[in-house]
């Protein structure tokens, strides 16, 4: 069965228009900042370069892997303003699952956590 090149062009153009019209996402960033003890401070922020404190419960997990892809145990401790992650040994890769929830804003009003 032959595909219609005209349909493919129209579909591609429609997709590009949808992407161009999509609202910009305003999001925060989460990253792991290494310290001198081999642990990592979990940092949260993003708007205007400002760091923000967060409840440690928003950090759902931290996973670590060595250079061969083997999982490494990670201890996560709540600390004032956030959390600290300590891998059992040197990690080549760390990944954090952080759930800050959903926020919405109507018009130019304040952001509110919802639903």
Image (tube, rainbow, N blue to C red):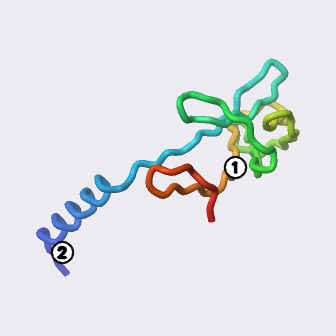
In the depicted view, which residue is nearer to us: 71 or 74? 74
Residue 100 in percent (x, y) is at 67, 51
- Residue sitting at the far left: 6
The residue positioned 81% from the left and 44% from the top of the image is 56
Residue 78 in percent (x, y) is at 86, 39
In the depicted view, which residue is nearer to us: 35 or 69? 35
- Residue sitting at the far front: 109
- Residue sitting at the far top: 36
Q: Is residue 48 left or right of residue 2?
A: right
The residue positioned 73% from the left and 25% from the top of the image is 34
The residue positioned 79% from the left and 45% from the top of the image is 55
Picture disc at residue 59: none
The residue positioned 56% from the left and 28% from the top of the image is 49
Q: Is residue 48 left or right of residue 44?
A: left
Label located before the other in sequence (1 or 2): 2
Residue 107 in percent (x, y) is at 44, 55
At numbered mark 2, what does the secondary structure look like: helix, strand or loop? loop
Badge 2 is on which residue?
3
In the depicted view, which residue is nearer to us: 18 or 68? 18
Q: Quadrant of the N terminus?
A: bottom left
Q: Nearer the viewer, mark 1 or mark 2?
A: 1
Badge 1 is on which residue?
97
């Amino acid at each position: 069965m032959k595909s219609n090149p005209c349909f493919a062009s129209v579909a591609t153009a429609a997709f590009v228009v949808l992407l161009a019209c999509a609202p910009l996402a305003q999001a925060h960033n989460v990253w792991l900042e290494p310290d001198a003890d081999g642990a990592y401070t979990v940092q949260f922020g993003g708007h205007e370069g400002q760091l923000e404190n967060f409840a440690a419960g928003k950090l759902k997990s931290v996973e670590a892997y060595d250079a061969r892809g083997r999982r490494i145990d990670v201890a996560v401790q709540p600390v004032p303003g956030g959390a600290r992650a300590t891998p059992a040994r040197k990690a080549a890769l760390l990944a954090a699952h952080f759930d800050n929830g959903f926020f919405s804003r109507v018009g130019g009003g304040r952001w509110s956590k919802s639903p």
